[in-house]
Image: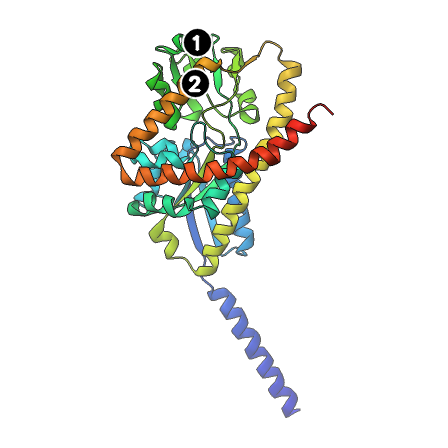
């Protein structure tokens, strides 16, 4: 009886010790500010899924509260919100902040640049992450890929673009380096938050805009005002990003850091395949249900002028900033090698089998 009693006491003590450890295990709460409005398909939904995954993977030890642009009222101010520590992390696009830190613009996408898969390869295995750290870490920020939309369409226009002259003084919502390119050929680029796009087009504040592609454009209703829909040149692989306050990230236990990085990587991949699926469905709907949409490609004369302006601007940026030069050369070198393979693999397959 004494032995059994001792064993029972030992067992109870062990159970008590284990339960005390579980109860004492520290929990963490993070706040995330996103550029997108509440309920925005693909964008807000990616962030919400990311937060759910983190909570499940950490068994509830880490939770993330997502505040959309409706809440924090600064859709294009996520950089500062996270840098200052008002929020622990954010979800946005790097090129929105080129006015604040010019070298941020290279990490979303570049005109005539890499496709989504080429860009992912450059980021993870071609030195892209290290260069992104050079740009963001001086601002107490860490960055991670946050979801790619793939090739974005060239935009919605009220009037058909037949020549470079048609771009003169054209007011177009278009962010990033592409805005600089259009300005070089005579257009007037503006940056407008997502929630204000339709109203700006409807009220003639702008003459044209680019948003994403069939995955998100159809629901926005742009075709009701601007029927000319152009194929892309400016964003061949648009990557959103997760921003993290570096001090906050480093304060977390190592296992939670790993969970966050894994969940962000999964969110990035899932957004890309979801965007592809949504565009597939919506493109079919556009062709069948919206015959008034006029799909166009920019004339060769226009594309050549845009490419010339793009190359000139890249040379100017590289000449004026050593870090910009390093980023531009890294992207250019990797893209030339990756494109040679893309042409013989993906494009070669599509080209040789399209008529079978």
Q: Residue at x 62, y 17 (%)?
A: 286
> Regarding mark 1 in the picture, which secondary structure is present there?
loop
Q: Residue at x 45, y 44 (%)?
A: 123
Asked if the residues shown at circle 1 and circle 2 are in contact, with their CB atoms under 8 angstroms apart, the answer is no
- Kindly tell me whether residue 12 is visible in this rendering: yes
Q: Is residue 63 above or below residue 100?
A: below
Q: Residue at x 65, y 14 (%)?
A: 289
Q: Quadrant of the C terminus?
A: top right
Q: Quadrant of the N terminus?
A: bottom right
- Residue 101 picture location, percent across and down: 30, 36
> Regarding mark 2 in the picture, which secondary structure is present there?
helix
Mark before the other along the chain sequence, 1 or 2:
1
Q: Foreground: 229 or 35? A: 229
Q: Residue furthest left?
A: 320
Please identify, in this view, whether the residue under mark 1 or under mark 2 is nearer the observer: 2
Q: Is residue 93 above or below residue 140?
A: above
- Residue 112 picture location, percent across and down: 45, 27
Q: Residue at x 39, y 14 (%)?
A: 206
Q: Which residue is mark 2?
A: 304
- Kindly tell me whether residue 192 is visible in this rendering: no
Where residue 302 sits, quadrant-wise, is top left
Q: Which residue is mark 1?
A: 163
Q: Is residue 60 above or below residue 69?
A: below
Where residue 180 sits, quadrant-wise, is top left
Q: Residues within 10 Å of mark 2 (few under 14, many from 20)?
A: few
What distance separates the C-alpha of mark 1 from that of mark 2? Answer: 11 Å
* Image position of 165 (left or right of 355): left
Where residue 186 sits, quadrant-wise, is top left
Q: Foreground: 255 or 26? A: 255
């Amino acid at each position: 009886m004494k032995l059994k009693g001792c064993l029972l006491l030992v067992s109870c003590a062990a159970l008590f010790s284990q339960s005390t450890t579980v109860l004492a295990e520290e929990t963490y709460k993070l706040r995330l500010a996103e550029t997108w409005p509440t309920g925005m398909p693909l964008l807000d939904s990616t962030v919400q899924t990311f937060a759910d995954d983190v909570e499940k993977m950490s068994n509830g030890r880490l939770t993330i509260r997502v505040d959309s642009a409706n809440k924090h009222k600064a859709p294009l101010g996520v950089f500062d919100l996270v840098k200052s520590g008002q929020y622990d992390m954010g979800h946005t696009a790097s090129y929105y902040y080129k006015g604040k830190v010019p070298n941020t613009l290279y990490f979303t996408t570049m005109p005539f640049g890499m496709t989504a898969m080429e860009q992912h390869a450059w980021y993870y295995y071609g030195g892209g992450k290290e260069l992104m750290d050079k740009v963001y870490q001086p601002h107490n920020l860490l960055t991670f890929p946050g979801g790619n939309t793939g090739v974005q369409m060239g935009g919605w226009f009220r009037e058909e673009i037949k020549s470079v002259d048609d771009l003169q003084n054209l007011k177009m919502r278009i962010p990033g380096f592409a805005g600089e390119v259009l300005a070089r050929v005579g257009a007037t680029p503006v940056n407008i938050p997502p929630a204000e796009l339709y109203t700006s087009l409807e009220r003639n504040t702008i003459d044209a805009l680019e948003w994403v592609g069939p995955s998100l454009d159809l629901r926005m209703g742009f075709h009701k005002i601007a029927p000319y829909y152009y194929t892309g040149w400016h964003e061949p692989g648009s990557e959103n990003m997760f921003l993290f306050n570096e001090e906050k990230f480093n304060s977390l236990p190592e296992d939670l850091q790993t969970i966050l990085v894994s969940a962000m990587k999964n969110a990035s991949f899932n957004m890309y395949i979801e965007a592809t699926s949504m565009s597939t469905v919506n493109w079919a709907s556009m062709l069948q249900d919206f015959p008034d949409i006029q799909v166009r490609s920019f004339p060769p004369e226009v594309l050549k002028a845009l490419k010339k302006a793009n190359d000139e601007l890249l040379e100017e940026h590289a000449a004026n900033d050593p870090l910009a030069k390093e980023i531009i050369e890294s992207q250019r070198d990797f893209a030339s090698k990756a494109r040679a393979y893309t042409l013989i693999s993906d494009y070669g397959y599509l080209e040789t089998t399209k008529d079978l």
